[in-house]
Amino acid sequence: MTFGVIHIWTWLALFLVTILYEIFAVQCTLAIIKLRSISVANLSVMISIAGMVCVYAYAGKEGELNNCIPILLATWLGNYYIMQKEKKKRAKDDAKKHIKNND
């Protein structure tokens, strides 16, 4: 395996698809917690499709480890952003419940 040549369009495609993969994965986890079976099933399919696209894009540049960089970056950023968004949403929901309980 070599570090290889940077192909910016491959990196961009891998980054964007991995962001989608992470969004689907976190949304699927949240749907599991809420017991939403149709959402879980649909999101699972989307996770599979995104994974297949990444594998296809990476396999086209076999042996070039640098293609892992946008995938790892997108994984981290996607999870971080989604979790921050969910924290804000839950804080807002908790505030509404607190106000409702005080009335």
Image: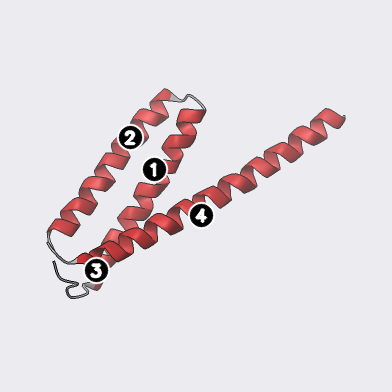
- Residues packed near mark 1 inside 10 Å, few (<14), some (14 to 19) or many (20 plus): many
Decide if residue 36 is on the left or right side of residue 8: right
Q: How many marks?
A: 4
* Quadrant, the N terminus: bottom left
Q: Which residue is mark 1?
A: 24
* Quadrant, the C terminus: top right
* Residue 81 image label: 4
Q: Is residue 15 visible?
A: no
* Residue 66 image label: 3
Q: Measure the C-alpha gap from mark 2 to mark 3.
A: 27 Å
x and y percentages locating residue 54 in the rendered image = 23, 53
What type is the residue that disc 1 sits on?
Answer: Phe
Mark 4 or mark 2: name the one nearer the start of the chain: 2
* Residue 44 image label: 2
Decide if residue 27 is on the left or right side of residue 1: right
- Residues packed near mark 2 inside 10 Å, few (<14), some (14 to 19) or many (20 plus): some
x and y percentages locating residue 81 in the rendered image = 51, 54
Q: Measure the C-alpha gap from mark 3 to mark 4.
A: 24 Å
Which type of secondary structure does the marked residue at label 4 adopt? helix
Mark 2 or mark 3: name the one nearer the start of the chain: 2
